[in-house]
Amino acid sequence: MSTDFGRGGFAGRSHLGDALSALLDGELSAGQQEAARAHLAACEECTDELSAVGQARSWLRGLPQVDPPFGFYERILLDRPLVVAVPFGARPGLRRRAGIAALAAAAAAVTVLGVGSPAAQPVNPSMPQLVEAHATSASVGADLLSKLAPAGVPVSFGR
Amino acid sequence: MAGPVRVRAAQATRTVAAVALVAGLAAPASAGAPAPLEAARHAAEQTVFEGVLTVRWRDGDATRSERLQVEAAGGSLMVRGANLVMAGPQQQRLLAHGGRGWEEMWLPSLSAAARPDGNAKYRTTTPADGPAVAGRPTKVIEVHTGGTLLERIYLDRETNLLLERDQYDRQGAIVRQLAFESLTIGGVAKPPIPPRSAADHAPEQVSPERLASPAAAPERLADGYQRLGIYRNGSVLQVLYSDGVYDLSLFQQRGRLVRSDLPDKGERVSVKGAPGWHYPWPGGQLVVWSDGGQVFTAVSDAPPEQVLTAIESLPTVPGRELSLLGKIRRAAQALMEPLS
């Protein structure tokens, strides 16, 4: 998170970046939220990024919980002390356990996102609506009979 | 004396013709449609009339047609078919499907740039006497480009109202036609009254600076198409283009195209090396294809060759999907943030 963000403004920034996550989590002050919303209103790229981040989060939250195999924590904590330093004889704290579980879940999520998620959502363009939108907008400043009258015919492309 | 008189008369005729020609050539080429189409536009906005208009179009091997009632007065025009369409004052556009409520499709607050000069691309012939259409004498104008006949336009000799418009394919066959079957000019037509309320289905204007990439809405496409405006309606971005005679809307939606979701009757075409599908509609052509994580739908009244040429010139839009690294970063952030 940049220092600009810490000062509560986005004026000097080209895009919101990590501040989008903070915005989704409600971690911004009222002033920061207002500044972020103003930036979003003027920046299509950040608007799209916000949508993508929100979508990724919803995918993650929709992942099923997986119980680790028996002895999973112990093997990590005792056999690989460099990963998580635990004092000899101490039991790993609940928070640390949760952190490790989160890391495992993140790895699973990465697998799901990297392999299983679609490249893009399927889109089925509503052709009749697009035709009507074209006919009405193209009729502005043009011959009404040529451009607008065909919209009186309902468009059916058949199947 | 008869000889010199005839010579002088011939000279005078040539002089008048030359002056007229020079005057015609020297006249400033006004931006927008060629003069006959501009005259028809003004006539449709200013003439009081009512009549029955038939729309015919080629749909594969079949020719389809629909009859529409049209009435205009006081600067408003109403088209009554299975859909009701209305052009209200101040460029308002409304549409109602099959007797359902009115939808506002275009608001006076929306704007579009002036159309480019169609005379740069098209040549129109001098108006000549044409056959009667709906019992009214006409003058006929041909529209050519590159030596190919594209259209014959029949204007009312008295008012310049468009009475018939025939669009031709490369083989010289009519592929689309608008023609009045009956028409009354003047008389008792009352101005169509805009509905008191209508659902807001109008797009919002988008400034080019707001776009993530200029490639999404280039100012120009091949074959003389220039951007008139950028609009957004929900998740659909519309970029409107014109070449001065025909218009082309390029609709863009994030996602991917699933062939099985599309109507079966589409003719397969190639767009930038990718498969696309072409469909005729009563007002022209529609082409749909997918590229760079976007689904594109081009809708136009231009001939299909022009539509394909224009969309071939679109730059590739950079992919907007999160990279794998981005997905990993976001996934890790989402999971770790509650614990930190």
Image (cartoon, coloured by chain):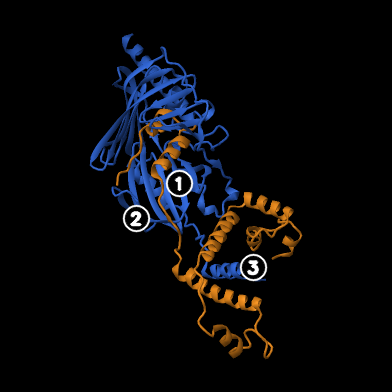
Chain colours: A orange, B blue
Residue B197 in sight here: yes
Residue B298 in the image, given as x and y percentages of width and height: 41, 46
The amino acid sitting under disc 3 is: Pro
Name the chain under label 3. Answer: B
The answer to which image quadrant residue A147 occupies is top left
Q: Dot 2: within a 10 Å radius of its alpha carbon, few (fewer than 14), some, or many (20 or more) residues?
A: few
Question: How many numbered marks are there?
Answer: 3
Secondary structure under the numbered disc 2 in the rendered image: helix
Nearer to us in this view, A15 or A146: A15
Q: Indicate which disc residue B259 carries.
A: 2
Residue B161 in sight here: no
The amino acid sitting under disc 1 is: Leu
Q: Which residue is mark 1?
A: B250
Give the vertical position of B195 relative to B174 (above or below): above
Q: Which residue, as the protein is rendered here, is positioned at the far top?
A: B1
Q: Dot 1: within a 10 Å radius of its alpha carbon, few (fewer than 14), some, or many (20 or more) residues?
A: many
Q: Indicate which disc residue B338 carries.
A: 3
Q: Residue at x 55, y 73 (%)?
A: A106
